[in-house]
Amino acid sequence: MRYLLTLLLLLNTLSALDVDTKVDVEVEKDKNSEIHEQSKELKEENRFFGEELFSGNFKENRQFHQNNDYILNVNDKITVKMWGAHNFIDNNLSIDKQGNIFLPEVGVIHLLGLRASELQSQVQKSVKNVFNKDVHVYADIQEYQPVSVYVTGSVNNIGLYEGLSTDSILQFIDKAKGVIRGVGSFRNITLLRDKVAIRNIDLYDFLLTGNVDTFQFRNGDTIMVNAMKNYIETEGEVSRPYNFELLNSGGTVADILPYVLPSIKANSFSITHWNNGEESNQEYPLSTASSVALGSGDKISFFSNYYMNSINISVAGEHKSKHHISAKKGATLYDVLEQLKFTDLSDIGHIKIYKKRVARLQKSLLESKLKELEQSVLTTDSASEEEAKIRESEATRVLQFIEKARKVEPKGQLILERGSDLRQVTLEDGDEIVVPLKSNFVIVEGEVNIPNALMYENGKDTDDYIEFCGGFTDRADKGKVLLVKASGKVLTKNNADYVEAGDSILVLRKVDAKNTIWVKDITQILYQIAVGAAIALQF
């Protein structure tokens, strides 16, 4: 966070345009190239409200719409039609550099600087001065002049962009590939004309209400996307768990409630402040939001602080009962299963239960192991330049593996052993119970030549089923063959004395010890993922 605030302070210098605009744009490009790279380092979970706005949906459109206050300018295209005593049609009359159009037998008509609402009367007046007889006149704007507008400041691609004078600011910023995430402001955008600020734009108006500020661009205008100065982080039971930009450094928690939209269950919040390098955290009732001060950089978590008397359980799979059950807090797996109506195809001997709390624990243990590996990769020294090159290549592969492993979501299965006392398995809110369908096959996957589902044969072991699938591949780790029982329990090949219908055999890939010094750590992580998520992740 402090790193981000440092960037924001650095960008404050970008708002002053003291030299020619073209020179400023080039200077901004040089500064932004470094800042853009730094912004990529922001964590993905630090999402900023509005960061997905500019994804190319605006830039390809041209916004030609009738605007009675539009000021006619050079190169605007005019349609003029006359009928009655005199007939004339021209759909492509262009206002020349002197601000005029020319009508045969009528002459020069000066239009530069008139409002669009005055066009019809001005042309009609000029026609009436020439023709005494009854001549009807129709005049309209056919096409607005194209303009070139500079887009600079905290955008991804500073430059000069062409559009129509009636295009919206959204189109021009989209052409510049949007605001730099976590760095540029959505609420402090300045339109400069002849180096003078003539308008300030707050894009939150559009994001929250759909209203966009419309105005007329002129050739050479500059859109300055200023640096974001103040923001707060939000999370928890809200509809919009984003980082939000603040117009001012102060305010109260109540000021940001229309942005985050707390859920109907949220009745409390905690606010984290950072002051002089120290962190402090305080909890408040949501009813006090209007009296709790808020500062830039604060983090607010919204949550429900009720005591729950009941829990909600989902029940999937082969049964004839409800798929969502509300139970009293403290209910056991036995209590819920007693309510279910099974079918002849229900495999009640291998019922599975998945717990969010267990999944979070598995994810935390995996992340801890990945961080250890990542730290080891980033701090390993090399004895020579040649060894350094080898280590760099290895490190790249390992870091790619870590990134892929972080995307794995463990299942959170609580393994039920044969004879487990289901009265001792206490359920929690959000648990999922799965009643599997009776199965008469065995799945073999991972590093075998022909991964497949095979009919169960009594007395066959893991080697037999692997042989039925064409045997091991050259990349298989024959010492890491896992038997995933129908209950979810995972056994190694050495401990697997028999295979049952509904089991799965998972053959992990071998990590070549000659190609990396981190083979032990990677192997442990592969095994951890296979057990927690039943996935044979490859390195």
Image (tube, rainbow, N blue to C red):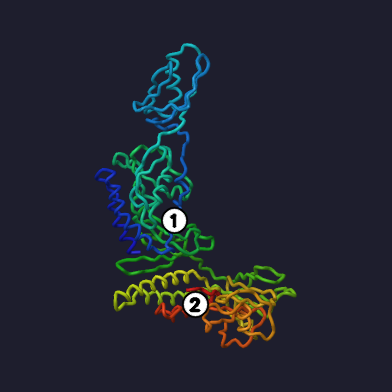
Q: Which residue is mark 1?
A: 49
Regarding mark 1 in the picture, which secondary structure is present there? loop
Classify residue 509 as left or right of residue 464: left
Residue drawn where x is 37% and y is 63% of the image: 41
Crowding at dot 1, Cα within 10 Å, few <14 / some 14-19 / many 20+, comes out as many
Q: CA distance from mark 1 to mark 2?
A: 36 Å
- Nearer the observer, 326 or 483: 483
* Numbered label attached to residue 526: 2
* Mark 1–mark 2 CB contact (< 8 Å): no
* Residue 159 position in % (x across, y down): 35, 47
* Residue 94 position in % (x across, y down): 41, 28
Classify residue 175 as left or right of residue 387: right
Q: Give the mark toward the camera: 1 or 2.
A: 2
Q: Quick check: can you spot residue 290?
A: no
Crowding at dot 2, Cα within 10 Å, few <14 / some 14-19 / many 20+, comes out as many
Q: Amino acid at mark 2?
A: Leu
